[in-house]
Amino acid sequence: MPNPHATGLQTMASTLEKFIHSLDLRALPRVLQIQSGIYCQGSVYEMFGNECSLSTGEVIKVIGFKINKLIASICEKNEVSQFSDKVELPLSFPGLYKIVADKTPYASIEEIVRKVSIGPTRFGHPCFYSTKDINLANLTIKHDEQITFNSVEEVHGTMAVNCVVVRNNQPHSFTLPLSQEGEFYECEDDQIYTLKEIAEWKIPKCRNRIVKLANTLHMWESSNRLPENFNGCLSLMPIYKVQAVMKSRKDIIHILSDLDVEVKDVTDCYDISSFLQPLSLEDIFERTSKEFPMVAEIVEGPSGSQKPYNLLSTGKEIVIHKKDQAARVLASEMRSDPSKRHYLIPMSYKGKFKRRPREFPTAYDLEIAKSEKEHLHVVATKAFTSPHKELCSVSVGDQFLVQQCQTSEVLYEGRKNLIDALACEQILSDSYKKVLLPMYMEGGFVEVIHDKKQYHLSEICKEFHLPFNVKVSVRDLSIEKDVLAAAPGLQFEEEITDSYLLISSASSPEESWEIPVYRSDMLVHLLSKDVQTVVPPVTRTTVEEISKEEYYMLRRYENLTFHPPPRPPKKPTAAPPPSFAVPKQGVSDVLRAPKNFYTDTTRKLCSDQAADVLGLQVSCQNDLVHHENKDMTGKATLEKTTVTKGLARNYEAEEEEEHDYSYIDENIIENIRKVFHDTSIGNEHSLSKKEGIKGKAYFQEAMPA
């Protein structure tokens, strides 16, 4: 039966490049016959270590393709000249780019679906507008109105696109059939993307993509590929790496799409089943649970030298016992240099951790981090002057026990307003003062740790809010080499759900490994062999070190189902704010002596310990100033003040164990990630120039002095 997605595929001979550029992934696999080629020695072609013969008349089955690199042409006034310089850019080339809307219209919804990537992530929701009104049964789409394409599915036997238009902040959903004709143009896109994201989602089939450079990630070393007169505008043409199978071979061959060869699509008159049927781990994972266990031969092994990837070589037979999902914790080293490493830690990790102090840039972050288990004790590292007498001003060195969020009435421009405030207990030299900090307060706080307990990973995830700073105190002895033990400190960022296949070697099935489905570039071929019923193998889990690319993909894609935290409150304005119910519990009740925390005698100790922490903080001041000049974190340096010196106490003699607190500068790429995360939520809050890179721009309205 002809493939319904094969519509528009050429049956006449064409160049491989032209064929791949017009090919829809949903039309795979396709059988191609080599028509002609130019080679020095017959038709032997070697790519990525695979040597193959592409003789005229040879038949290959294309099973996949993805963009391998980009050819960039310098643009002037958004147009490419025939004399424009061209450079080859890898997908990892640094920088953030904005997309220039395509000026060439699409003639139908079917053409958009065929040429534009539409998928489940926010990158797969392109926006278009029609030059004419579209009249539907219960809705009229006005001309020039932005239409968001969310997904493609069959509706009442007809293929259609699920769409949304937003009117008065209210979304209206509807479907458009692929047969809908008109004149559709791409809408302007104000988001920023990496080259890899543009390559995967934003380059339409048979079209180039013009982009503008928005920002450069200086922390990534790169050769200077762009000319000196580069004005920031590029036209990108993709070069694909094509995965194919030959009848005479059991492995996968890789061919670049710009190979000088002509091909013809002969799928409709060829038996596809006569070729090897390689499957990805994603394909295996989509099978029903009843089909497991199964025996397979590795057609293309995964990259990586660490266990278990070094055990999964090409040609080896494996047993795939089951598919499953498990919780993992995404963690990063607490380092400020580009060599920061990232890990996925399984809940079965047997090592133990000790807490390390966290840093909080705002009072809002304190509210998020507070716990019912204990009162959060912090010391201020940045001064703040409150514009309201009802709220507390903060000096460097002030110490607070964080209580809870509540509303407070303040006088502003002669009118009373209710604003959110954070109730705290300020620790003085010989007493405790009940204070309120405005939630919009932009300050700086560092945590004071009193907890000496050693925690398992599962305990931390259960008892504390992430992100959470730790250091390995007892390594996992069941792991041959515990990479976490060597880290100076770790930040547990978030808990994710990871899909995996439980795999063991067919020759030694006594132990099995959890192989991640979406981070293993591995292909297998199922064998018609029965699996011997044996005792379930011992499952081995390991700490997985992931690349920066995989780290950002996990942060941005895996957790799109999580609801982001509410935006921090703005400074009060003259307009009446939303009304909040004031808790019946009074401030005096809220700020009573904390229970299950520590005694009043210990509070004196807290004061000394916090002073010691602050002393260390000030000793790092020159380094912080140096970092602030180098990177654009926008983090304010600490004030040189006699208050700090006055707070410094000789605490080391009293404390049995020295606290090696560290104060971590966020590096640029982490800040960019935060900006990206804010962008994915929406553009409701504009970033200030100085603080924008931190992604912490909580104010849109300036308060008068």
Image (cartoon, helix red, strand yellow):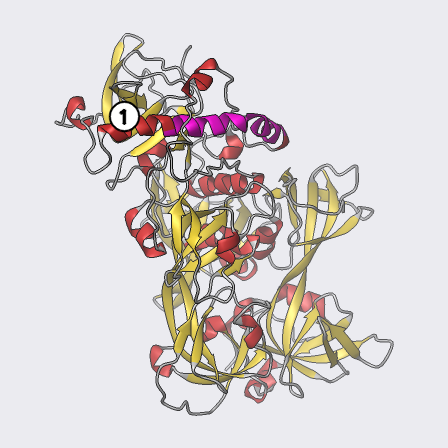
Magenta stretch contains residue 617:
yes
For this orientation, the residue located farthest to the top is 414
Residue in front for this viewpoint, 644 or 83? 644
Asked whether residue 144 is in view, the answer is no
State the image quarter where residue 630 is shown: top right
Residue 64 horizontal/vertical position (percent): 59, 71
Q: Residue furthest left?
A: 584
Spot occupied by residue 388 in the image (x, y as percentages of width and height): 32, 13
Q: Which residue is mark 1?
A: 424
Looking at the image, which residue sits at the far right? Answer: 40
Q: Which residue is located at x 42 percent, y 26 percent?
A: 650
Identity, as a three-letter code, of the amino acid under mark 1 = Cys
Work out whether residue 435 can be spotted. Answer: yes
**Residue 142 in the image, given as x and y percentages of width and height:** 43, 42
Residue nearest the observer in this picture, 95 or 492 = 492
Magenta residue check for 600: no
**Residue range corresponding to the magenta coloring:** 609-629
Give the overall secondary structure of the magenta segment: helix
Which residue lies at the image location 58% right of the left edge and 82% below the top edge? Answer: 268
Compared across the picture, whether 14 is left or right of 491 comes to: right
* Residue 431 in which image quadrant: top left
Residue drawn at the location 57% of the way across and 71% of the way down: 302
Closer-to-camera residue (509/673) = 509
Question: Up-down: is 185 above or below 480?
Answer: above
> Tag 1, which secondary structure?
strand
Asked if residue 666 lies left or right of residue 150, the reply is right
Horizontal side, residue 92 vs residue 525: left or right:
right
